[in-house]
Amino acid sequence: MAKSSAPALSIPELIQKKRDGERLSTETIRTFVSGVVNGDMQDCQIGAMLMAIFQRGLDKTETVTLTDLMTQSGDVLSWPDEWRHLVVDKHSTGGVGDKISLPLVAALAACGLKVPMISGRGLGLTGGTLDKLESIPGYKVEQDKSDIIRMVTDIGCCIVGQTSRLVPADKKLYSIRDVTSTVDCIPLIGASIISKKAAESLSSLVLDVKFGRGALYKTPEGARELASELVSLGEGVGIRTTALLTCMDNVLGRTVGNALEVVESFDCLRGAGPSTLTELVTKLGGHLMVNAKQAANVEEGQKRIANSLENGEAMKKFAAMMKAQGVSPDTVAKLTKSHADTIAALPRAKFTRHLECMKPGYVTAIDAIVCADVSARLGAGRMKASDVVDPAVGLELYVDVGSSVKKGDRWMTIHYNNDPLSEDFVSRLQQALSVDAKEPKCTSLINCVITGKDVKQQNAV
C-alpha cells in the first residue's frame, strides 16, 4: 500500500520550523508565499515568520526558492526570443544624490539594449527614482504591463513603478519588514531585489552596492557581503549579474533633491554632467554592454555609453520615453533644449540661501549623510511612506572633493519653501564641508567589481 503524502503544515507549524532553525522545503516556502499573497496569513503571522528568518537565516537553496516563488506570485514580463541577450537593468542600494538611473537607462537604450526598469520611491534618507521623475510635469510612473511592453518594444526603455500584479508577495512582505525591524536581513533584501528583476525577465543585471557614511553599510566589507549574496542569487535565478562596490561618503554629483537632480541628469544626457556621475553611468553601462554581448570588453562598452551621451542619442531616447509616459511635447522640448530651459521647465523653490567657505584650502569631504538629512527635512524626502515630497527643494553644490577654494567662495545654495530657514540646518551644512590645506588624493568611486565567476570561486573555497 502506497504511503500517503505528509499533510500540509499549518501556518503556526511553518513559523515554528524556521523559529527552531530547520531548513524549509520548497513546498513549505510555497505555502508561506501563497499565504502572504492570498491573505491566509495574518500580518502578525507574517511578521513572526520574517523575524524567524531574520534570526535563523536562509541558506542559498532556501533563498533562491523564496526568490523564485516571489517572482512567480504575480505577472512576469516576456520578450521576443531575438532579445535573449538584450534585456537588462540596473539596481542601486541607494545613495545621496544618486540620479544614475535617469541617464543610464536612456544611454543603454541608445546602444540597442532593452531596459524595462521598475523602480521605487524614496524613504528616509534614500532618494527615490520615481520621486525625481514625478518632478517632471506630466510624467506618469504608474503604467500597466501592456504599457511597459509597448514602451520597451517601441523605444527601448521605460522607468515605471511596481504594478499591483508584479511580485505582489514582495509588496506585502516589504511593508511588514519595515515595521518589524527585519529590513536589514541579507536573504530578505536579496529576495526582494532579485524577485522584481527576475519578473522583468532580464538577461543581465548590474548592481551598484554603496558603502560609506551615506550608505546602509559603512565599510566595503559589509557591502561586499550583500553584493556577493545578490550576485549569487541573481545567477541562481538565471540572470547574469555583476556588482560594483561604490563609495558613498560624499554626495554623488552636485545636487540633492528631486527637481535639482533631474536638472543634473539632463546635463549628463548632454554629455556635460559632473565627473563622478558620468563615471558611474559609463562604468555601470559598460559592464551591462559586455554581459549583453554588445561589447568585447568593459572599456569598449564605456566608450559606447559615453558616445551616446555626447552625440545626443541618449537624450533622444529620454525624450521619447517622457512622451510615452505622459509628458507633453512642449514640455519635452523645453526640458531637452538647454540647461537654463530645463531649470525653467521644472518646479522651483521660493527661496534660496547661499553658503560660503569659511577658510581657504582644498575640499576633503562633503558629508553625504548630513546633506541627505537636511534635504529630507526641507521636504525632499519622506520620514514615513505617507509623507508628501516637495519636488523643488534641496541642495545645489558648486565644489567637489579636491576642489581648491578661497575664503568667501560660494560652495552651496539651499533651495527651500518654508521661511524662515532653520539656522540649525545652516550650521549643520556648514560643518558638512571639510577644507584642509593639503590637497586630498582623489581616487575612483569604484572599490571593486564582483561577478558570477568570482562568487562561484568564493563558494568553491
Image (cartoon, helix red, strand yellow):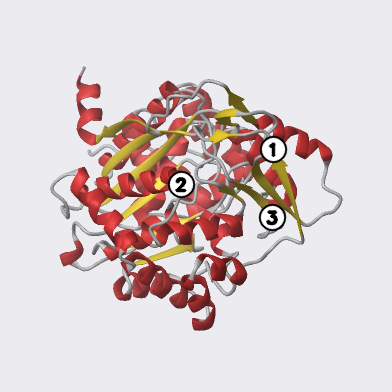
> In the image, 436: left or right of 147?
right
Task: Kindly identify the amino acid type of the residue bearing the numbered disc 2.
Answer: Val
Residue topped by disc 1: 408
- Residue 74, above or below 452: below
Graded by Cα atoms within 10 Å as few (under 14), some (14 to 19) or many (20 or more), the crowding at tag 2 reads many
- Name the spot of residue 251 as percent of width and height, x first: 54, 39
- Measuring 37% from the left and 73% from the top, which residue is drawn there? 151
Residue sitting nearer the eye, 95 or 421: 421
- Name the spot of residue 75 as percent of width and height, x first: 39, 62
Identify the residue at the far top of this view. Answer: 461
* Callout 2 secondary element: helix
> In the image, 298: left or right of 225?
left
The quarter of the picture where the N terminus appears is top left
Residue sitting nearer the eye, 138 or 74: 138
Q: Is residue 40 visible?
A: no
Give the total number of marks visible in the rendering: 3
Task: Kindly identify the amino acid type of the residue bearing the numbered disc 3.
Answer: Val
Residue topped by disc 3: 393
Residue sitting nearer the eye, 273 or 230: 273
Identify the residue at the far left of this view. Answer: 296
Task: Kindly identify the amino acid type of the residue bearing the numbered disc 1.
Answer: Gly
> In the image, 439: left or right of 106?
right
> In the image, 361: left or right of 170?
right
The quarter of the picture where the C terminus appears is top left
User: Mark 2 or mark 3: which comes first in sequence?
Assistant: 2
Residue topped by disc 2: 33
* Callout 1 secondary element: loop
Closer to the eye: label 1 or 3: 1
Cβ atoms under marks 1 and 3 closer than 8 Å:
no
**Separation of marks 2 and 3 at Cα, in angstroms:** 40 Å
* Callout 3 secondary element: loop
